Image (cartoon, rainbow, N blue to C red):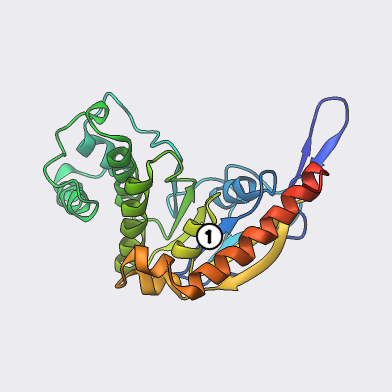
Amino acid sequence: MIYDIPGGDSVEALQDVSFELGAGRLLTLLGPSGCGKTTLLNILAGFLAPTSGAVWLDDERITKPGSDRGMVFQQGALFEWLTVAENISFGPRMNKKKKAEYAPRVDELLEIVGLGGFGTKQVYELSGGMQQRVALARCLANDPDMILMDEPLGALDALTREKMQGLILNIWKETGKTIVLVTHSVEEALYLGDRLFVMAPRPGRIHKEYTLPFAEQGLTADARELKKSPEFAEKREEILNMIWEMEEQIMGTGV
C-alpha cells in the first residue's frame, strides 16, 4: 500500500504482506507506530484498496465494505440518539428485517456481552466499557464471518480492559468467528492472539509470526496467573525487546 502525499512524494505503508488465515482463528497485529497495522485492517475491511495485490475472503475478492466483515473501533462509534437495543439492531433493520426476526437475537446478544436489562438505556448513560460491549454486540448482530477490531480496548481503564479481554475470548470461542485485532499492548496481543504478527515499520511488513497457546488457556485459566507464568513472561520480554529495537531504529537515537 503506497500513499501519495502533497508535493509529489509517497509513503510505502505496506510491502509484500502476504498470509493466509484459517477460519475461526484469532490474529493479533502488533508493532511500533507507523508499521501499517491499521492500514492492513482497513484493507481487510474494504475501506482501502491496496496499491497492488488482492485480499480474498473465502472465494470472494474484497473490494469494498461488506456485511461478511464487522468492524469494532477504538471508540464505540455508536448512535447516541438511539437506545442500546436500537444500536445493536441497526444492521438488521437496515437490511429490512422485521422486529420479530431480530428482537430475540438482540436480547440474546445483550446477555452474551453482559448487558441484560440495559436494552432501553441511552448510550450516554453507559460507561466506556459498556459502550464497547454494545459496539461488539452490534457487530455480532450482523453475523459477519470476520470481526475486525482496531484498538477496541485502548481507551479503557486497566480493570475494565482485562474484563473485556475475557469477553472477547469467550465470544471468539462460542461463535467460532475469525477475528483480527490491532493493539499496541504486547500483553494484550499475547493473551488474545492464538496467532500473532509482529510488524516492522517503514515500510510495514510482517517481521515475525507466532502461534500461541495463551488464548485457549485463557478460556479456563485465571488471567492474572496466566500472565504471570514463565512462558508468558518470556514471550512478552522477547517481543518487547524486538519492538524496542525497532523504535530505536526509527528514532535513530540508540538510547
Residue 143: give x, y in percent of width and height: 34, 56
Residue 216: give x, y in percent of width and height: 39, 73
Q: Residue at x 64, y 53 (%)?
A: 31
Nearest the viewer among 246 and 10 is 246
Residue 42: give x, y in percent of width and height: 58, 46
Res 177 → quadrant? bottom left
Q: Would residue 19 be seen by someone viewing this image from the given angle?
A: no
Q: Residue at x 56, y 64 (%)?
A: 236
Q: Secondary structure at mark 1?
A: strand
Nearest the viewer among 34 and 48 is 34
As drawn, 254 above or below 8: below
Nearest the viewer among 146 and 255 is 255
Nearest the viewer among 75 and 88 is 75
Q: Would residue 69 be seen by someone viewing this image from the given angle?
A: yes
Residue that lies at the very extreme toward the left in this rendered image: 117
Q: Residue at x 37, y 48 (%)?
A: 161
Q: Residue at x 15, y 49 (%)?
A: 107
Q: Which residue, given by chain and number where applicable, does mark 1 sit on?
A: 28
Q: Given the image, on which type of amino acid does mark 1 rest?
A: Thr
Query: Is residue 53 found left or right of 184 in the rendered image?
Result: right
Query: Is residue 137 found left or right of 22 in the rendered image?
Result: left
Q: Residues within 10 Å of mark 1 (few under 14, many from 20)?
A: many
Query: Is residue 160 found left or right of 57 in the rendered image?
Result: left
Residue that lies at the very extreme toward the front in this rendered image: 255
As drawn, 212 above or below 168: below
Res 133 → quadrant? top left
